[in-house]
Image (spheres, grey):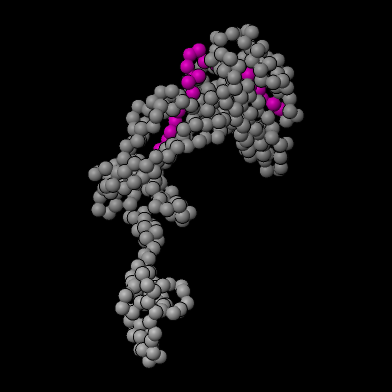
Amino acid sequence: MKKIRVIYTFAGIAGLLFLFSCASVPAPSDVEKTDDDNFITQDNESRQEGKVIKEPKPISVQNTSNQLETEFKNLLKRIELKVESSPKATTANRGFNAPYVVTVKDENGPVAGLELTVNWPIGRTNDTVTYSATRIKTDSEGKVSFTPAAPKFAVKDKVTFYPSPVSSSSQIVKAAYETAVSAPYAVKSEYLGYPGGLLYTYDFNEKGNPTTNNFLLLQSLRNIGVNVGNSPVSDTSYFNMPVSELYKETYNIVGKSYKFMVMGAFKYAAPAEETADGATVTLTADITCIDMNNGNILYKTSFTETVTDKNKWTADQKCRKILAEKAADAIVYGM
């Protein structure tokens, strides 16, 4: 095709420029080329021979993200989540006997089609728990039903339900969490059944020396239905040895007659503080649960408690009782 060269008079060019200045500016998609005058409109180029610059129209974009977040916040103010029912505690490797049921309502009644996020435990290492999450929508009655898979480990935690956030904004996530509801997720150790276990647990005095078997832990476990007795090994020097040494010595005596053994020490975390008004005692419980079948460590935990009372002895006894009850609960739901 031959190249057309058009020569315009000064007056003609001025008139054309005036007409273009009065015309509406097209968007980038409206660019056209005409054979009559050979004008070509292009963005971001300087005026050259046979070309005229036309700035594109500004594009108006609606901020849908902010709109969704605003609507979500308004929704959270109107609705209420409620746990209608939840299953009883189960045992590791056994499924729950019923689902978790949660309803969502507002001032007009059930809220249908609302997406909720569910968080629940899926694993643990000692006292560190990991979680999984899924999303489910409320039915026509504003209800969701959730049944976790049979848990493979003991744990005492919770299942949490909350409206699924519409963005990852920290404010939105925080607002969603503030409307959350939770229900207990309780799974007992599978090692608690017959024939039970042994306790190699001792109280230590303020000087750091073992004294006697911890009767309070023995009593606390028996009170919640766990069959336990004191270990046949009474030599306290095993506290200074690897756990495997205590296991070997105990196994040589009882074999596989018991499912588990608990090695525990209740010690002073700091010297007792005594004043004219009373005394303060701080104790730490160190607990290790051992599989009597193979010597593997099933669970380890440690926690500290402080008690103030009228004198050192009463503060000491109260503190040991609290620790014993906590240790029993930790063994049942952690081992």
Q: Which quadrant of the view contains residue 97? A: top left
- Magenta-drawn segment: 182-205
Question: Is 183 included in the stretch rendered in magenta?
Answer: yes
Q: Nearer the viewer, residue 107 or 12?
A: 12
Residue drawn at 46 percent across, 73 percent down: 44
Residue in the picture at 40% in, 50% down: 165
Which quadrant is home to the N terminus? bottom left
How many discs appear? 0
Dividing the picture into quadrants, the one containing residue 320 is top right
Q: Residue 297: percent from the left, percent from the top?
A: 60, 22
Find residue 271 and report its horizontal and vertical position in percent: 73, 36
Q: Residue furthest bottom?
A: 11
> Residue 238 in the image: x percent, y percent?
70, 18
Q: Main secondary structure of the magenta part?
A: strand
Question: 216 above or below 129?
Answer: above
The outermost residue toward the right is 207
Q: Looking at this view, is 309 or 82 the one in front?
A: 82
- Residue 63 forms part of the magenta stretch: no
- Residue placed most toward the observer, 186 or 143: 143
- Eyeballing the image, is 248 above or below 104? above
Q: Is residue 178 visible?
A: no
Where residue 91 appears, x then y in whole percent?
44, 24
Q: Residue at x 73, y 18 (%)?
A: 237
What residue sits 56% from the left and 13% below the top? 293
Indicate the quadrant where residue 3 lies.
bottom left
Q: Is residue 171 visible?
A: yes
Residue 235 in the image: above or below residue 188: above
**Does 298 sit left or right of 122 as displayed?**
right
